[in-house]
Amino acid sequence: MNRRVNKFYYFLLAALALAALSALFPAGALAQCPMCRTAIEHAGDAAARTLNFGIVVLLVPPVAIFCSIFAVAYKKVKGEEEDESRKP
């Protein structure tokens, strides 16, 4: 069981590392709606960077919620599998 838990935590750590990496390089955050893009074109580079950072910050809670739900479901499935393997 300990080995499975370690594998799960390594997987979770890798997923968090990928999420952190994508937060550092927000290529997907550059795709704003046309109205936002028009407003930002006239505001300057600093405003565009700030808006992109805001988009990434607003992305963190949904990703954290998804990861939490996934972790709970994963633990529940693994716990049921261990219970079935212990039955005589």
Image (spheres, rainbow, N blue to C red):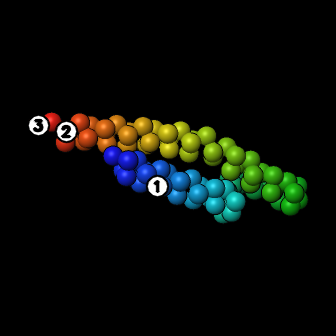
Name the amino acid, label 2. Answer: Arg
Q: Nearer the viewer, residue 12 or 85?
A: 85
Compared across the picture, whether 65 is left or right of 80 comes to: right
Residue at label 1?
A: 11
Name the amino acid, label 1. Answer: Phe
Q: In this rendering, is residue 61 above or below 35?
A: above
Q: In this rendering, is residue 85 above or below 45?
A: above
Residue 88 numbered tag: 3
Compared across the picture, whether 38 is left or right of 30 comes to: right
Q: How crowded is mark 1: few (under 14 residues within 10 Å), some or many (20 or more)?
A: few
Residue at label 2?
A: 86
Name the amino acid, label 3. Answer: Pro
**Closer to the eye: label 3 or 1:** 3
Q: Which residue lies furthest to the left in this view?
A: 88
Q: Nearer the viewer, residue 7 or 29?
A: 7
Q: How far apart are marks 1 and 2 (CA)?
A: 25 Å
In the rendering, at what x and y percent does residue 4 appear? 36, 50
In the rendering, at what x and y percent does residue 85 appear? 19, 42
Q: In which quarter of the image is the C terminus?
A: top left
In the rendering, at what x and y percent does residue 24 appear? 70, 59
Q: Which residue is drawn at 56% across and 42% down?
A: 64
Going from N to C along the chain, the mark reached first, 3 or 1, is 1
